[in-house]
Image (spheres, rainbow, N blue to C red):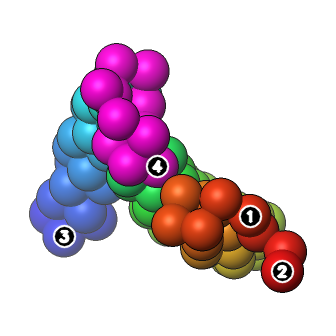
Amino acid sequence: MTTELLSWSILLAQILLTLAMACAVYRLLRGPRAQDRVLGLDTLYVNATMLLLTFGIRTGSTLYFESALVIALLGFVATAALAKFLMRGEVIE
């Protein structure tokens, strides 16, 4: 009963994360301002990281956890660089 409940919970989480990614892509493409697009991109990489983690839990493979860590690191750097670009107009001083 416990493993079946965990399996269904992970499947539901994956479906909901996919829907959240679709909403983030909508905001990324449709956002009226650049700040909305950056927020959509930030939400997209966080959701992608969580989706990879749920795949890793479901399959038991550590490869998904490592790729989720790489995506999280690159996403944070990209968000910080885009925020600095939007505030100052340049990334490197």
**Circle 1 crowding by C-alpha within 10 Å: few under 14, some 14–19, many from 20:** few
- Magenta stretch contains residue 36: yes
Q: Specify whether 14 is left or right of 48.
A: left
Identity, as a three-letter code, of the amino acid under mark 2? Glu
Residue at the image point whose x is 25% and y is 63% from the top: 6
Which of labels 2 and 4 is toward the front? Answer: 2
Q: Tell me if residue 23 comes above or below residue 13 in the rendering.
A: above
Residue 72 visible in the displayed image: no
Do the residues under discs 1 and 4 have CB atoms within 8 angstroms? Answer: no
Q: Tell me if residue 10 comes above or below residue 12 in the rendering.
A: below
**Label 2 vs 4, first from the N-terminus:** 4
Task: Give residue 22's position: percent from left, percent from top.
Answer: 35, 27
**Residue topped by disc 4:** 38
**Residue topped by disc 3:** 2
**Label 3 vs 4, first from the N-terminus:** 3
Residue at the image point whose x is 84% and y is 80% from the top: 93
**Circle 2 crowding by C-alpha within 10 Å: few under 14, some 14–19, many from 20:** few
Residue at the image point whose x is 67% and y is 68% from the top: 81
Q: Tell me if residue 83 comes above or below residue 12 in the rendering.
A: below
Magenta region: 28-38
Residue 48's label in the rendered image is: none
**Label 2 vs 3, first from the N-terminus:** 3
Which of labels 2 and 3 is toward the front? Answer: 2
Do the residues under discs 2 and 4 have CB atoms within 8 angstroms? Answer: no
